[in-house]
Amino acid sequence: MMQSSFDQETSRRLHVAIVMDGNGRWAEARGLPRLAGHRRGVRAARRIVEAAPGLGIGTLTLFAFSSDNWKRPRPEVDGLMALLGSFLRREAAALATHDVRLSLIGRRDRLPLPLRAAATRAENETAGARGLHLRLAVDYSARDMILRAARRRVSGSVPSETFAARLGQAYGGAGAPDVDLLIRAGGEQRLSDFLLWESAYAELRFVARMWPDFAPADLAAALDDFHARDRRFGALPLAVSTPSTRSR
Ligand code: IPE
Ligand code: IPE
Ligand code: MG
């Protein structure tokens, strides 16, 4: 029997996923190179990671680089890889101190070696942390992940939890509970191949603000809105399904 790789305590807190979009437009609007926007984006991410545990978030998945982002000009791709590597090298110790466990999800085989090494080191250094599970999605494609898990030979019927655990193993081994709230900064209203399986019942929130300007107050506002929503998972609202009103 396959075990899920997240503990019960993590499952009790929220899983929030964020598409950190809008770095390029933020920079272009200021006459700066796109990479300057990505650098500011890293600062925004740091602030959000710090704020997350205090807002009831147990798992935070950040979309940093999609498998389709390889299509961008070489200098931008190289700059992004360098930024991610230096983030992992510089922040690993601070993450461990703040009880943050880091995992990279996505394909690793196409990443530059120094980035791969920095990721493994950061994962090892933070492995014991339980305050927040920070999952950084790099060279990530949800469709590719699902395809890889589905291609593994399956004998007999596989319960969906087992398949979900297998998905995590196909893509970095860092499983997580389903996404509760998916936020996208930068004004676009699409998923761009992010967490398609885990977001089956995620609440969606699209924010016009570009990612470099996204602040902890924006995250807090998103969570306030989330808590006011009625999640039904296909069932009836609680008030309707109580025994006194249910038809016999
Ligand atoms: C998101 O910002 C970061 C990555 C995709 C790496 P973009 O670079 O997509 O910024 P926009 O959407 O062009 O403004
Ligand atoms: C999604 O943003 C990927 C990340 C934020 C890392 P994109 O900018 O790549 O998505 P599209 O091209 O607008 O769909
Ligand atoms: Mg974009």
Image (cartoon, grey):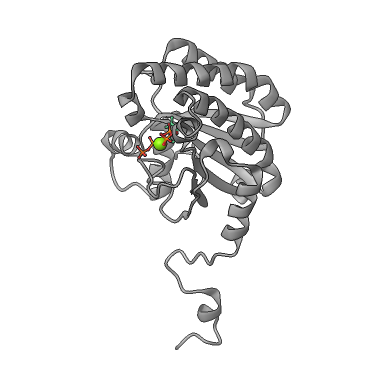
Q: How many marks?
A: 0
Q: Residue furthest front?
A: 31
In the rendered view, does 141 fall on the left or right side of 26? left
- Judge whether 55 appears above or below 231 on screen: above
Visible residue check, residue 8: yes
Residue 88: x %, y % from top left: 57, 20
Residue 215: x %, y % from top left: 63, 42
In the rendered view, does 194 fall on the left or right side of 123? left
- Judge whether 125 appears above or below 131 on screen: above
Q: Nearer the viewer, residue 141 or 235?
A: 141
Residue at 37% across, 48% down: 190
Residue at 32% across, 31% down: 68
- Judge whether 49 appears above or below 14 on screen: above
Q: Quadrant of the C terminus?
A: bottom left
- Quadrant holding ligand 2? top left
Residue at 49% across, 16% down: 82
Corner quadrant of residue 140: top left
Q: Quadrant of the N terminus?
A: top left
Residue 114: x %, y % from top left: 48, 11
